[in-house]
Image (spheres, rainbow, N blue to C red):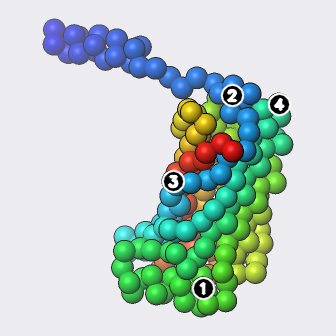
Amino acid sequence: MYARLLRVLAVVLLAATPTAAAVDLDQAAGSYTIDGSSIRFTIGNASGGGIKAGFGSFKGTIRIDGKDISRSRVDITIFPASVSSGQQRIDNFLKSDAVFDVANERQIAFRSASVKRTGDNTATIVGRLTARGKTFNETFNAELMGLKGGRISFHVTGKVLRSRYGMDVGTPIYSNVVNFDMALTGRRG
């Protein structure tokens, strides 16, 4: 009896839960300056754990074309000297010439080349990532999380092979794959 009541209650709750509606591109159209955001990454370790860090300083813009999403653009500049893991030893290593080489490389840049809508609130963004003087195409997945009062927010994920950028120190003990997890918020204007 209780099991049946719980199943009925679960169905009622699921039916009452609002689902994300498709975004009207005309409402989202415009240029946004990225602020109040976070760019985090992880690198796995063969024995478990790994490196978890983020960048404290970056800037960028998001331009959404209300008529044709494929003409939308994303530009982000990251300042690798701002990398922080919460552990000074790891921060020093990440800033060294073995990884980001912050003494010689002041920024990492991403410039989108294409945006393709993949769902009501999702898109795939392909663009050119430049780090340590090397440039390759990379793909990120974006999900629109909110649009209100001239502010827009996205959850963005992607995987980048660090060896392509000359940052492969420690492989295979540390994974060659860098997992990005970003919360990007922008204000219109």
Circle 1 crowding by C-alpha within 10 Å: few under 14, some 14–19, many from 20: some
> Disc 4 residue type?
Lys
> Disc 3 residue type?
Gly
Of the residues under marks 1 and 4, which one precedes in the sequence?
A: 4
Give SS at disc 1. Answer: loop
Q: Is residue 187 above or below residue 118?
A: below
Q: Estimate the spatial distance between the alpha carbons at disc 1 and disc 4, rounded to whole Å.
A: 40 Å
The disc placed on residue 102 is 1
Give SS at disc 4. Answer: loop
Of the residues under marks 2 and 3, which one precedes in the sequence?
A: 2
Q: Nearer the viewer, mark 2 or mark 1?
A: 2
Residue, far left: 2
Q: Estimate the spatial distance between the alpha carbons at disc 2 and disc 3, rounded to whole Å.
A: 21 Å
Q: Which residue is mark 4?
A: 67
* Residue for point 39% across, 87% down: 89
Q: Which residue is mark 3?
A: 36
The disc placed on residue 27 is 2
